[in-house]
Image (cartoon, rainbow, N blue to C red):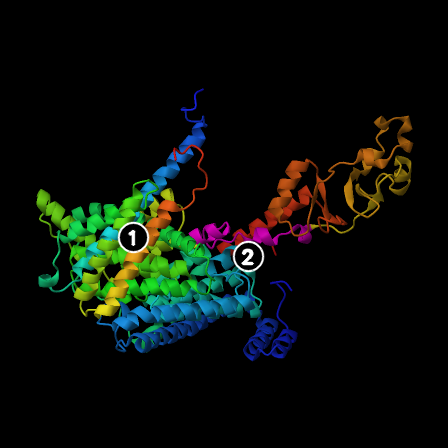
Amino acid sequence: MSDTHAPHHSTDIRRQARRRRLGRVVLAAALGIVVAGYTYGALGERVDPAEWNDLLPQWLEAAALGAIFAVASLPIAGAIIARAVVPVPTFVLYLTVLLGKSPPVPYAAAFVMALLYAGALTALSTYLAQRPERSKLGSRR
Amino acid sequence: MTADTPPSPHDAAAAAERGRPVLALLAGAGARLAAGRKLRDNEVALLAMSGLFGIAIGAAVVAIERLVQLLHQVNFAVAANQHLSAGGALDWWRVALVPIVGGLLAGSAQALLRRARTHEVVDAVEANALFGGKMSLTDSIGLTLLTAISSGFGASVGMEAGFTQLGSGLSSRIGQTLRLRRGDLRTVVGCGAAAAIAAAFNAPLAGAFYAFELVIGNYSPSVLAPISIAALFATLVVRGINGGESIFALDTPVRIAGLDYGLFAVIGVVAAVIAIATMRGVTWIERLFRRLHVPAWVRPSIGGVLIGLIASIYPEVLGSGHGAVQLTLDHPFPLAILLGLIAAKGLASAISVGSGFRGGLFSSSLLLGGVYGGAAVVVLHGALSALGVADGEFDRAAYMLVGMGSVAAAVVGAPVTMILLVLELTGSFPAAVGVMVGVIIASVVVRLTFGYSFATWRFHLRGVPIRSGYDIGWIQDLTVGRLMRKDVHTAPMGLSIAEFRARFPLGGHKRVFVVDAAGGYRGIVVTADAYNPDLGEDADARPIDELCIARGQFLLPQHNVRIALHRFDAAETEALAVVSDLDTRRVVGFVTEGYVLRSYNQEFERVRADELGERTLFGPE
């Protein structure tokens, strides 16, 4: 057997590894949907459309943030790029929400809260992508 | 002291000596009543007691609700008649800071309580399933106060768990003081829970069926009257103090058409998914908090930071959510807000429970389900109108009620309770029938795919093997120590067969236990085997050890009847020694398989008879 061949594992081990990988993808996707839904609702809390200055439709902004978060949460090499992106739109979107809702949050407090939102989402995605696996048998990493 | 021993004046004196005058009074009263009229054998006395429990617990629920409302008024500056979660304009700094302060308070209080009482708090379901209805009143009061602090400082939890704990804990304590039988004690624990839920929702039927479905674990005529009376009296007290208003009000009657019932089934399926996600979410977040490597008492305040962040955008997540349910019933919010609120409430509840605030998901699941039902109407309206399948007219309130009942039934694990709750809250039979469709589908989907309610899921994670309040604790209580015979006869190792025959003549003792020099168990010799003619002529000089059976097979006094029967199967012998402990293995008794089986059957029959309310059904006690 050459070195390039993957080591032989039993069907059960491979099935477990597949299930584990699928579980992580499903969890990342589910959390991405939660982030998107949460953000979509938050954007809808803003009261004065003249001050929104959105680049995209609200639903698209929310969906994009959810998708970026989901990718950032996956244990793949490219996730680090998504993780680098997550804080900026999160901070900007939630700053507009906190300043635009009724009653608005004062600027300094809104700034800190938006930073906390960005920090929390980035930290969570980092944890999800980098958490140790119980077993690497059968995985291709 | 056993549960069947009648109370005596001596107990009253002992309780008074311990500085518990109320318990002393009860014990004294119990002793007098037991002596005179045999209180515990008197069904009318049990009914009267249930009514008194209902009155006391109804008043306690109102008092705690007012305490929590007062905390909301002080902490969040809400009006006296306003729900915290009703979405009013709250000061941003209060919303951000109060949950953190609440987290510190709840965390510190829990740490202090844990120092004093290291064991897990036993709730009504666990008490009835495993401990014959025995609960600690001190633990229950502590947990109720923690729940009040959590809810009062904005954690996204309801008070129902606290009310149930207090109600059942109080009933159990009084029942233990009066030395009620195991079956009756379980019933009064159910009375406490029923009264608490009935008072919390102003809904006696829902309260009673909550007790049947969750706390007692089944319905039988013997428990119907006491539980119904407790729920009814608690409701009457609440109505007397607060008035007869329902906690949720509908402006217009519910309208349901034929197509709606099919859609309610779909609502039920998605409700099951939401319920499972919420229950798993709590566990997942709890695990995340444990990995933070910070002291347990700090975790709720970290949870408070996150709850404050969420509530800064969605103030409806603060507290139990009853105000938010009414708000969403009254106002047709856009889809974006509804979807956001589902995510926000789910997250806030999971963070609250997962970080260490105390409280349950009963109220949270009502809000989650209600908002989900509202969102479903918006989606259905758009989709079906676009397809031209229907005219797109749906009764929003009906769908909200179905969503509410379905998610709550799946989370709480009490489908009939939820159907009756909707019936009592709305007074609408069509709404109750609609909710029934969603509730049944959601319950079946959760049972087939997940298999737990939130309470039983938590038991499962703790390794407690119970699925409801159905009594399985009697098996734990039926121990080898209770069943064993103590007339043990031993012979030392190395004793010759001839000496053995001299000491133990045929027709005397049926079996003898062989022990080593230190008195440790080595095996059993059946006396008849020592007299077997097939042993040969040289048998007299051979050591008795050669005839030992069941070597290394023994039981401990604390083993229960189930373990004992497994050991008999494995050892393939009709008697097993009972040893003091695993180190010294001193023989303290023995049990036979036949006697263990007979005791198991008798106890099983007694439990069945208790359930049916026929104490003499299987012969006199």
State the residue at coordinates (45%, 73%). Answer: B52
Estimate the x, y position of residue B155 in percent, counting from the top left. 35, 66
In the rendered structure, the answer to whether residue B129 lies left or right of residue B430 reads right
Q: Quadrant of the C terminus of chain B?
A: bottom right
Q: Is residue B397 something one can see in this rendering?
A: no
Residue lying at 88% horizontally and 32% vertically, measured from the top left: B542
* Quadrant in the rendering for residue B104: bottom left
Between label 1 and label 2, give the one nearer the viewer. 1
Disc on res. B406? 1
Q: Which residue is mark 2?
A: B615
Query: Whole-percent x and y of residue B87?
Result: 23, 68
Q: Which residues are magenta?
A: B456-483
**Real-space CA distance between mark 1 and mark 2, rounded to the nearest whole angstrom:** 38 Å
Looking at the image, which residue is at 18% across and 55% down? B336
Q: Amino acid at mark 2?
A: Arg
Amino acid type of the residue that numbered disc 1 sits on in the rendered structure: Ser
Seen from the viewer's position, the closer of residues B437 and B304 is: B304
Corner quadrant of residue B525: top right
